[in-house]
Image (spheres, grey):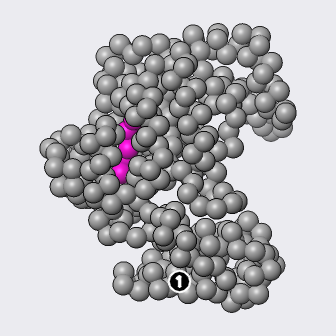
Amino acid sequence: MSKTTAALAVLKSAGVFGLVSRAMRSKLRILCYHGLWLGDSPQYGDCLYMQSQRFEQRMEWLARSAFPVLPLDEAIRRLDDGSLPDNAVTITIDDGWFSTLKGMVPVLERLGLPATLYATTYYSVRGGPVLNVLVDYLITQAPAEVLGRSAYARELAGTHPGLAPSSPAGRNAIGGRLAATVDALPGSQRMDAVREIASALGKDIAPILEGRWFDLMSEDELREAHDRGLDIQLHTHTHRMHGLVPEKVASEIEVNRRELARILGIDPSSFRHFCYPSGVHSRAVFDAVRHCGIRSATTTESGLAAAADERMSLSRILDCQSMTTLEFEARLTGVWDMIAGARKRMRSSEEVYAG
């Protein structure tokens, strides 16, 4: 048992979880998920993908808990008018991965839990894997000796002398450069470039493509997800924030809205909730987002949402494969925020004293 888990267990047994939950009962808990891991071992992306068994266990725990689960639109409306039930939760899922339809939707259906999918549309329209994520996977999972012998390691040595290619920083640098290179190519050449990267690293990507590890839902699959009860909302068309230029952000939202309305055959005004891609946001874009008819916009900042919070930057609780059930409960009750706040105040006091 880790020190964190042990400390949380003591706090829970002492009744602190219950006390904090009651103190935070008027706040909204907005859960954040992405996709399920469809690939082989080891798992890639702790907070991007979750094992299907872990997600099912988490939803079953939530369904049994004292945390009522509301649809997002209802939850935001009731946060506005002060009628939220105590300790209310809403479930949000980012991106629109194929694995969400394959593994998450059946669990949500079985348990009767409402959820919102923030869907980005470029790859749903275009088809194929999300290439920058696939490239990152190829680099982060490449054996150290293979990566060290590659041309990518020699290029890294020229740009970042002394940085080991197999280190996390080295892999990030290589992956970032290759993803940018692929992204700059004409669309028809991108997949060929990714195949060349995989070949250089000795990786057979046929099972990846066949298993759709990194695919988003197709248009037909988005319609199926919607027909099966998943609320579909906005996440930009290309999953980009364009340097937080308000006009470009607004354009991304409007293209996203237009594509979703076309795909799902519903009124464009139905799309009034938005999630910032990768959590990238700034107060500079709030007015532009609001003028797009957005009632709520969520980030990846951790925390509970209070009635007084800015609706264009609502915090969420990001659930991850590595998170224990006790840590998950600590986040839902608000205990985790309480501990984080105490640590922040302590650091600030130490800085003032040191100064």
At x 45% / y 68%, what residue is drawn?
Answer: 129
Residue drawn where x is 73% and y is 16% of the image: 12
In the image, residue 323 sits, relative to residue 259, either above or below, namely: above
Of the pair 49 and 54, the residue shown nearer to us? 54
Tell me which corner region of the image, top left, top right, bottom left or bottom right, holds residue 286: top left
Residue 149 is inside the magenta segment: no
Q: Position of residue 145 (x, y in %)?
A: 80, 80
- Image quarter hosting the C terminus: top right
Whether residue 86 sits left or right of residue 254 in the image: it is right
- Quick one: label 1, few (<14), some, or many (20+) residues within 10 Å? some
Is residue 343 found left or right of 199 in the rendered image? right
The residue singled out by tag 1 in the image is 195
Number of marks in the image?
1
Residue 296 visible at all = yes
When asked about the image quadrant of residue 258, the answer is bottom left
* Left or right relative to 265: residue 260: right
> What residue lies at 55% left-to-right and 71% top-to-bottom?
207
Snapshot quadrant of residue 185: bottom left
Residue 301 in view in this figure? no
Looking at the picture, does residue 300 appear above or below residue 40? above
Q: Which residues are magenta?
A: 115-119
- The quadrant of the rendering that contains the N terminus is top right
Task: Examine the residues drawn in magenta and state their main secondary structure.
Answer: strand
| Relative image position of residue 181 (x, y in whole percent) | 51, 81
Disc 1 secondary structure class: helix
Give coordinates of residue 79: x percent, y percent.
37, 21
Residue situated in front as seen by the camera: 222 or 137: 222
Q: Amino acid at mark 1?
A: Arg
**Is residue 117 one of those drawn in magenta?**
yes
